[in-house]
Amino acid sequence: MTTPAIASRLPLVGTTIFTQMSALAAQHQAVNLGQGFPDFNCDPRLVGQVSEAMRAGHNQYPFMTGVPALREAIAAKIETLYGRRYDSAQEITVTAGATQALITAILCSVHPGDEVIVIEPAYDSYAPAIALAGGVVVPVAMQVGEQGYSVPWERVAAAIKPRTRMIVINTPHNPTGSILRQADLDALAAIVDGTGILVLSDEVYEHMVFDGQPHASVARHPVLAERAFVVSSFGKTYHVTGWKVGYVAAPAPLMAEFRKVHQYNVFTVNTPMQHGIAAYMRDPAPYLDLPGFYQRKRDLFREGLAGSRFTLLPADGTYFQCVRYEAISDLPEAEFATWLTAEAKVAAIPVSAFYSQPTESGIVRFCFAKKDETLQLALERLARL
Ligand SMILES: *Cc1c(COP(=O)(O)O)cnc(C)c1O
């Protein structure tokens, strides 16, 4: 008996760097600042509200588009924060995490041979999703200098071709911790205005923007919002990455196509989580307090590294801190991250892992969504280098 071989739909995909580094971290008993998730628990009130929903019998299929109370809470939140009113019946869909929202937005709009511009370094799920749709990834590299990472919009403009169907953006940005500002969105709007190009905006870190800066949501930008899928995730906002509940907002004609695919790749997202989150969202404090919560951790981590031989890049958003290590080592990023895990016993992620083509910048990413004592232990070890 032999198992028939299948020609891979994703021949270039292997084990992700996150899995590799986490395994290495466990092997060396290193502090894991690699993979991006909290090592602390969520608010017990949220757990209580989900448990309450289960006890109240909310345990069968909900509406395909999501529990109405949750869609309404999302629409109200977006309107309050970003000034655009999405119709909760037709323009908001609850998804199985942001990942499913992203792949579904791509599958519903990208046809074989269509080109999708991806700004790199980029979150790892975009390229495989585009490949499954038969699309072609057109990477545009961010530039990195003294002021940190920024998007060279003239290069994005130069990458536009007749087959360009979509541009994927991510702000605040994983892995760099940079944010897009109003001027960036205006530059993007000038590129896409009057074209048929869609925008897929990954805003899962919308509530992690620091130093009093606003989050420049695509939902707020009239030119962009008209052609955009805006994606967010409760996993990131409420410290529950394992729950996999997110959402997408888009104008009704785009959402109609989104839902055709959504209906057959997940159909519905788990019911009690949706009811629990809807109840929890009545209080805006948990997400309004999030910038302060993570800014304190960012500052603790940056102050701890200030005396070390790492050079800190700006960290305007997300829970990631990128650092240069040229004063410590001239190893390529992946080898340095491996060495750091084994020798210093702190795991990081090489930024080179977020590019489709070999790119070395001498930069690694640390995640500071960790308990203070976890950060302190990592800082003690990093300071010795
Ligand atoms: C974590 C993350 C996601 C995925 O979010 P889920 O809700 O866990 O699916 C998407 N984009 C970026 C940039 C992320 O960091």
Image (tube, rainbow, N blue to C red):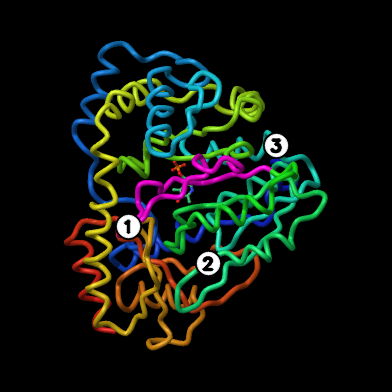
Q: Label 3 to label 2, Cα distance in Å? A: 27 Å
Q: Label 1 to label 3, Cα distance in Å? A: 34 Å
The answer, for residue 335, to whether it is visible in the render is: yes
Please report whichever mark, 1 or 3, sits nearer to the chain's N-terminal start: 3
The quarter of the rendered structure image containing the C terminus is bottom left
Residue 29: where, in percent of width, then height? 28, 66
Helix, strand, or loop for circle 2?
strand
- Which of pointers 3 and 2 indicates the residue nearer the eye? 2
Q: Amino acid at mark 2?
A: Ser
Residue beneath the point at 41% across and 22% down: 72
Residue 187: where, in percent of width, then height? 61, 57
Q: Label 1 to label 2, Cα distance in Å? A: 17 Å
Residue beneath the point at 51% across and 18% down: 89
Residue beneath the point at 38% across and 70% down: 314
Residue 102 lies left or right of residue 45; in this view the side is right
Q: Which residue is mark 2?
A: 150
Q: Amino acid at mark 1?
A: Phe
Q: Which residue is mark 1?
A: 210
Would residue 251 be counted in the magenta stretch? no
Please report whichever mark, 3 or 2, sits nearer to the chain's N-terminal start: 3
Residue 45: where, in percent of width, then height? 19, 31
The quarter of the rendered structure image containing the N terminus is top right
Residue 48: where, in percent of width, then height? 21, 26
Q: Which residue is mark 3?
A: 109
Helix, strand, or loop for circle 1?
loop
- Mark 3 Cα shell of 10 Å, populated few (<14), some (14-19), many (≥20): some
Name the image quarter holding residue 26.
bottom left
- The foreground one among 237 and 209 is 209
Helix, strand, or loop for circle 3?
helix
Residue lying furthest top: 57
Q: Which residues are magenta?
A: 198-224
Residue 296 lies left or right of residue 127; in this view the side is left
